[in-house]
Image (cartoon, coloured by chain):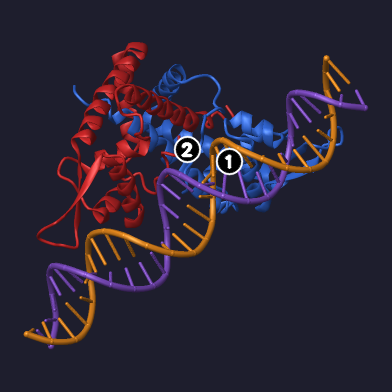
Chain colours: A red, B blue, C purple, D orange
Amino acid sequence: MSSHGFELPLRLLLAFRMLIDELHAELARQGHPDIRPMHGFVMQAIGPDGTTAVELGRTLGVSKQAAGKTIDTLERIGYVDRTTDARDTRRKIVRLTPYGMDALNRSARIFDTLRARWADELGEDRLNALEADLRTMTPGNPWRLDTPGWFGNL
Amino acid sequence: MSSHGFELPLRLLLAFRMLIDELHAELARQGHPDIRPMHGFVMQAIGPDGTTAVELGRTLGVSKQAAGKTIDTLERIGYVDRTTDARDTRRKIVRLTPYGMDALNRSARIFDTLRARWADELGEDRLNALEADLRTMTPGNPWRLDTPGWFGNL
DNA sequence: TAAGATAGGCAACCACGTTGTCCATATAGT
DNA sequence: ACTATATGGACAACGTGGTTGCCTATCTTA
């Protein structure tokens, strides 16, 4: 009927928020109280091999300055470090610290647990269908959220 | 398998963003170029009868000051106006202007169109199932996003 | 009527994004 | 080899949307 369409985006957002909030509540319990939604996302984007600010900005679809600031924060709270590239002294390579790796590994486990909870509630088939449908409707590359800020303040 | 759970929140966010981006692209075409994701959401929360800053803040789960600032912006761009309540001169009632109403009506129609596009792509049954599942997994009241900022900058 | 609760606004601050500018270093072209 | 251009990083100023703390005006209640 009329104006039913309004519910869909809202529920998508609510569902996303629920998962993220639960993730971070659990991360806080597991020794990562300072991590914010953005940080996990950015650390995923940094990956095991490291990046640079410019490259990270391109991956995430934000300016190099924004990426740089985020890296500053992550460095300050101990999740990444920066080392100058010997082959190109302009570049500074950003790499996850062991603490950062730990956060990333724990995140993956927690997300799996949360997904399992959804599977319990909805049934594995329904959840698979839901994921398949979302995949159908959303573009391929999950990293380019384009103009983030979508992780908000929390 | 392992670390599959990471995809779900990402797809939820991506899907949400897609819908919102398309909504606002279309709203811009229909004479509302200045409206931002937050604004539509806030206007929905204001509703046809109006509110006050404090009440709006409570509805949205933000401080009254934050609500007040958002109202300032909305007033500046012509979507709401403020009138002092005669029965309680402390209160200022915030109401949608006709322009604001127009934006809200158009949003509803556009969301319906977007939902119809999803139904075309996925089939009505699958979409109904998807919505039902999201409803199962998310709490009742869609307004209390709690600590928004989730609409980001865009 | 005095005391407390409530509405709104102001200021200062934080997080995260943007542009614009600048410097240092690499890389290419003549 | 040397100048010209491109690139990586950082700094500053600004916008937006949050926060807390505080202050004043107005209602409400004991």
Please, what is the three-letter code of the amino acid marked with disc 1? Answer: Gly
Vertical side of B80 occupied by C26: above or below:
below
Across and down, in percent, residue A41 comes to 31, 38
Q: Residues within 10 Å of mark 1 (few under 14, many from 20)?
A: some
> Are there few (<14), some (14-19), or many (20+) residues within 10 Å of tag 2?
some
The residue at which mark 1 appears reads as B40
Q: Nearer the viewer, residue C19 or B138?
A: C19
- Are discs 2 and 1 located on one and the same chain? yes
For the N terminus of chain A, give its image quadrant.
Answer: top right
Question: Residue B127, can we see it?
Answer: yes
The x, y position of residue A69, in whole percent, is 35, 51
Q: Nearer the viewer, residue C2 or A70?
A: C2
Callout 2 amino acid: Trp
| Left or right of A84 in this view: C20 | right
| Label 2 – label 1 distance at C-alpha | 13 Å
| Residue B123 - label | none
The chain carrying label 2 is B
In this image, A26 relative to D22: left or right? Answer: left
Measured as percent of width and height from the top left, residue A53 is found at 26, 53
Residue on which the image places disc 2 = B150
Percent x, y for residue A150?
A: 42, 41
Query: Which quadrant holds residue D2?
Result: bottom left
Q: Chain of mark 1?
A: B
Secondary element at image label 1: helix
Q: Residue at x 31, y 40 (%)?
A: A77
Asked if residue A40 is positioned above or below residue B127 in the image, the reply reads below
Judged left or right of residue A2, residue B21 is left
Q: State which mark lies toward you, 2 or 1.
A: 2
Of the pair D8 and B47, the residue shown nearer to us:
D8
